């Protein structure tokens, strides 16, 4: 029997909570939302710091289980509630690439495109975990040119995880809008779950 979700999403508008929102929408999972408005510094309140001592959003709880870090939240939800729909099984050859791109999203891609004040030569990049920005961007072009999805024909949680950071990086101009990345961004942003999450995360000014 499928486990019963008891999920609370701790989120703020205009934040990286988008990724977790998109994942919950893809899975159609019922959940409560607690507004941890970062503009009002609710993410630094003691009751929230007990959930995520980093004082960052998003986080989820599922009954007694606490998960922070967007990729971990998505991997957790896919494995526990996806019933094989959004994650390759552990004995599927696509499982390795799937995990690779989910980790790559925030361990490599994000720092590479955010820390633009860092020198991008081989010597400077050899001592840091995310390598050269130029290499990361060219790798993304090659990956996304394969499509339609990151694992090829199959849409998966890797698209939610890496797709979220790519989408935001394109919107904020942190990565070049190449034909490959733009076409991929068009595909992910046409999904109903993406639109639902975007509307919740970036509501129009009231
Ligand atoms: N590594 C985290 C990053 C989360 C993150 O940086 N969240 C930002 C919002 S976009 C935040 O909470 N910033 C508030 C702060 O650090 O004070 C993840 O991937 O979930």
Image (cartoon, rainbow, N blue to C red):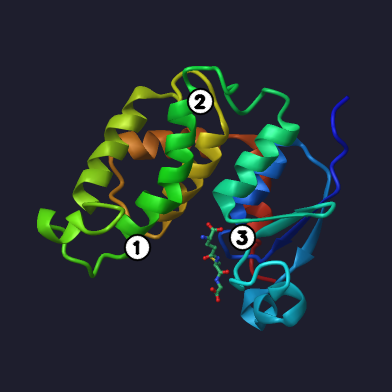
Distance from the alpha carbon under mark 3 to that under mark 1: 20 Å
Q: In front of the other: label 2 or label 3?
A: 2
Distance from the alpha carbon under mark 1 to that under mark 2: 28 Å
Q: Do the residues labelled 3 and 1 touch (CB within 8 Å)?
A: no
Distance from the alpha carbon under mark 2 to that under mark 3: 32 Å
Residue at position x 73%, y 72% from top? 50
Whichever of callouts 1 and 2 sits on the residue coming sooner in the sequence is 2
Q: In which quarter of the image is residue 84?
A: top right
Name the residue beneath numbered marker 3.
202
Name the residue beneath numbered marker 1.
114
Q: In front of the other: label 3 or label 1?
A: 1
Q: In this view, does 118 lie above or below 109?
A: below
Could you classify mark 2 by the number of other residues whose Cα lies within 10 Å: few (under 14), some (14-19), or many (20 or more)? some
Residue 20 screen position, x and y as percent:
64, 50
Whichever of callouts 3 and 1 sits on the residue coming sooner in the sequence is 1
Q: Is residue 53 above or below residue 109?
A: below
Name the residue beneath numbered marker 2.
95
Q: Quadrant of the C terminus?
A: bottom right
Q: In this view, does 152 lie above or below 158?
A: above
Task: Determine if residue 156 is in view.
Answer: yes
Q: What element carries label 1?
A: helix
Could you classify mark 3 by the number of other residues whose Cα lies within 10 Å: few (under 14), some (14-19), or many (20 or more)? few
């Amino acid at each position: 029997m499928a486990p019963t979700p008891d999920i609370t999403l701790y989120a703020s508008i205009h934040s990286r909570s988008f990724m977790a929102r998109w994942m919950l929408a893809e899975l159609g999972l019922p959940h409560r939302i607690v507004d941890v408005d970062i503009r009002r510094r609710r993410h630094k309140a003691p009751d929230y710091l007990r959930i995520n001592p980093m004082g960052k959003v998003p986080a989820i709880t599922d009954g007694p289980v606490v998960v922070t870090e967007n990729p971990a939240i998505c991997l957790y939800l896919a494995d526990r509630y996806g019933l094989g729909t959004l994650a390759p099984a552990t004995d599927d050859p696509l499982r390795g690439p799937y995990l690779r791109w989910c980790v790559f999203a925030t361990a490599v891609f994000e720092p590479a495109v955010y820390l633009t004040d860092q020198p991008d030569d081989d010597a400077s990049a050899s001592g840091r975990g995310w390598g050269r920005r130029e290499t990361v961007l060219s790798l993304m072009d090659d990956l996304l040119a394969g499509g339609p999805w990151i694992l090829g024909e199959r849409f998966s949680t890797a698209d939610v995880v890496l797709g979220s950071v790519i989408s935001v990086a394109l919107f904020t101009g942190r990565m070049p809008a190449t034909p490959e990345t733009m076409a991929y961004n068009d595909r992910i942003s046409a999904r109903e779950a993406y639109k639902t999450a975007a509307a919740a995360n970036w509501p129009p000014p009231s």
